[in-house]
Amino acid sequence: MSNSIDNINWKEINRLALPAIIAGIAEPVISLVDTAVIGQLGATELGGVGVGASLFTLIMWVLAQTKSAISAIVSKAVGANNLKSLKSFIPQALIMNFILGASVMIFALLLSVPIFKLYNAQGDLLNVANSYFHIRAFGLPIGLLVFGIFGVFRGLQNTSWAMIISFVGATVNVVLDIILVFGIEGIVPSFGVEGAAWASVVSQFIMLALAVRYLYKKTDFQLIQVVKIHPKIKSLLKMSFDLFIRAIALNIAFYAGTSLATSLSDEHVAAFTIGVNIWLFSSFFIDGYSNAGNALAGKLSGRNNFNLLLKVTHKLLKINVFIGALLGLTYALGYKLIGSFFTDDELVLEIFTTSFWLIIISQPINAIAFTLDGIFKGLGKTAFLRNLLLGATFLMFIPSVAMFHTFTPGLIGIWVSFILWMSFRGFPIYIKLKSIVRNA
């Protein structure tokens, strides 16, 4: 087998992908640790944090789509050897991210209780979710600014800096989680659910400090620069809007799943929370090579080399499907043990194990969707991605999950619907990509 794909060799792909895997799993690791630690407090606490974290993740995913838009613009400039043209664009884009995050944070804090009631949360579950979210929400503008800087780094064909920053943030979160949730006798009091939220916020502040340092030390860009609005801001807003709508549709699917699980019982939503965190961890793990595709797609489109892009896509698909299958095999080998890592509640574990097999078989399917998704984000084909996800959510997922909930309520129907949803998201992108290459 050749060691290169024309002038894109495996060393370059792995240089982008492997650090991106570590950087990408930082956020789901934070959520996994929160879930595992809080799971020791009880099913209500675990379910409440699951609902609170779902809202936080929904908002962050919607807003953080600007990262992919920034990366696409920067990587195309790299491919066209015209990076100096973005000197004023980068600080304007990053400041826009922070202001957007702060504005949404205020509205989210004011509307959190009505939103959680839409999740069917009530009583103690509602109180836990609201308590957790009201602290975690302070990380929204900080996290969005960090993601924006990560988008700059990825566009510059460098994922190592984000990896280092994310690893430090995840490590800090793990340590603080254990300390603040359970306390240290005679030294630090136990803060319970609120301790987990504060641990996440503190880790995000540390990540921001490191991200700004790398931005100033390793690139020619800064955060503050007073100039007229850069013409690329219009493209950023358009792509970001498309990706916002797409992310909203994506999170409607997760909201529907969480809401239906919550309507069944605290134990069902606790089991669903465990499954979602494993799903997200796997997704971000697979997304490492997808991020490499994102960066390379932008650069190659800047060079108008679409034939090479198709070859790179095929290689990335093979790698990611293998990773997805390997993850599925690992989960299968630990089938009876993984749930007990999060909770010792026997009913929660019983509900979880009856549907975990669906999460396992979904991994290769998810790998295909995420790979092609990353390629199209790098190409800036955000309108196509927006329309595709709207169709997948409202024409596939919602009817499917509603049918299952009507006739066989439980987590199995929810996870089957997610598998159909991911299938609908992946394969049409490949057909469109082949069309783009033919017409290039």
Image (spheres, grey):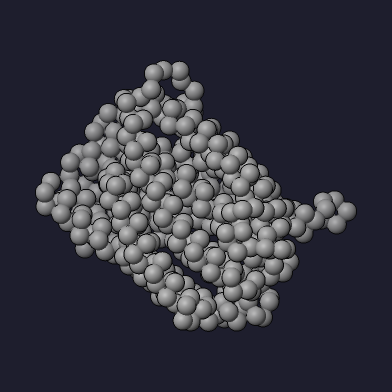
Where residue 58 sits: x, y (%)? 51, 53
Q: Is residue 55 above or below residue 265?
A: above
Residue found at x 66% / y 57%: 129
Foreground residue among 326 and 384 = 384
Q: In the image, 3: left or right of 360?
A: left
Q: Residue at x 29, y 47 (%)?
A: 383
Rendering coords of residue 173 (x, y %): 64, 51
| Furthest residue in direction top, as rendered | 227
Residue at x 67% of width, y 48% of height: 134
Q: Position of residue 67 (x, y in %)?
A: 42, 42
Q: How many marks?
A: 0
Of the pair 156 and 377, the residue shown nearer to us:
377
Q: Is residue 196 left or right of residue 95?
A: right
**What quarter of the picture does the N terminus occupy?**
bottom left
Does residue 207 appear anywhere in the picture? no
* Residue 52 quadrant: bottom right
Tell me, yes or no, if residue 239 can be seen here. Answer: yes
Location of residue 208 (image quadrant): top right
377 or 179, which is in the foreground?
377
Q: Residue furthest right?
A: 186
| Rendered location of residue 350, percent (x, y) | 60, 82
- The residue shown at (30%, 53%) is 387
Along the line of sight, the residue nearer the viewer: 194 or 329: 194
